[in-house]
Image (cartoon, coloured by chain):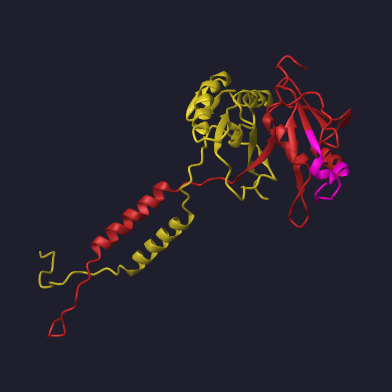
Amino acid sequence: MSSGGEEQIQLQMTPMVDIVFLLLVFFLMTFKIVAPEGDFNVKMPLAAPTQGRPDDALLPPIQVRLRATDDGRLAGIQMGERPLNSFGELRREIRAIVGDDRGPGSIAEDAEVKLDCDYQLEFKYTIDAITAISGYISPDGRIIRLVDKISFAQPRTPADK
Amino acid sequence: MKLWRTSRTGYAKGDMTPMIDMTFQLIAFFMVVINFTEVEQNERIRLPASELAKPPDAPLQSPITIQVTKQDTVIFGGEEMAVTGLRRLLLIERQVIEEPPGRRPSDATIVIRGDQDAETGKIQEVIRVCQEMGFEKFVLRARQEEGI
């Protein structure tokens, strides 16, 4: 306390500014932008039978076949025996089968899709197909789920066409 | 010639307040957005985009990440290898999972981060190798499509 009244108490700013800058540099260094990612469940139980087994599944799995050109591009989509033109059409077909009922015991709950893809098909087309099968975004922005149970058929070898 | 005025004894004082204000704001911003979770990512993998790929609400149970490059190699635990090389490492992974009694490899989730140009057959090969090692739960990772 000064008695004169003119002397001001000097606050030492330097250590605080030092620490603040250190903190800033630390946060800057550890900052990384992570793109949002999401997952699609794939049902692949160990004893995956290739032949259908008559148990709890009321519906036989819907077979979706994706054919590829030699360089891995999508050559054709087939649902059962029917050829389809686009993933949008595949989604419409799946929607027509499972309907909009999502309650327990509904078709959507039991329906299963089996994907049969050519070996060389680029993975993005498989994800596009899985996206079309798993659901869609309604006009009000909500995600409407269609089929949750998605599995892969027996893998094809590169020579298979 | 006299360059400096020696008569003045006081220091020139810059106003520190705006700088400190801004610095604190920056620190607060970085503290809020920082994410310490160790996400296994690799710049080489370009995930396929999907409009339905939304970040999960709950974290996955014992996730094991396997990345598949477009050169059809597999990156697992920072090591790049062919698909067949996965067996040895998955065996170790399995032993680690089985260590606490009552836990099985089927409790773990295999996260497959496949490049968008990787072959689907390669992804299926990875799944098959994991199945042989006793893993049952799989998720395919996709990046959230921009503009959605």
Q: Please identify the quarter of the rendering in which residue A22 is found.
A: bottom left
Residue under the point 52% across and 37% down: B41
The hue of chain A in the figure is red
The hue of chain B in the figure is yellow
Q: Position of residue B118 (x, y in %)?
A: 63, 27
Q: Position of residue A18 (x, y in %)?
A: 27, 57
Q: Residue furthest bottom?
A: A4
> Looking at this view, is A9 or A99 the one in front?
A99
Q: Position of residue A37 (x, y in %)?
A: 60, 44
Residue under the point 73% across and 32% down: A151
Asked if residue A160 is positioned above or below residue B136 in the image, the reply reads above
Q: Is residue B124 magenta?
A: no
> Looking at this view, is A43 or A64 the one in front?
A43
Asked if residue B77 is positioned above or below residue B24 in the image, the reply reads above
Residue under the point 84% across and 30% down: A54
Q: Please identify the quarter of the rendering in which residue A110 is found.
A: top right
> Looking at this view, is A103 or A71 the one in front?
A103
Numbered range of the magenta stretch: A96-113
Left or right: residue A114 compared with residue A40:
right
Q: Residue furthest top?
A: A159
Figure label count: 0
Residue under the point 54% across and 26% down: B90
Left or right: residue A148 compared with residue A106:
left
Asked if residue A159 is positioned above or below residue B93 in the image, the reply reads above
Left or right: residue A86 compared with residue B10:
right
Quarter of the image with the N terminus of chain B is bottom left
Q: Residue furthest front?
A: B101
Q: Is residue A102 magenta?
A: yes
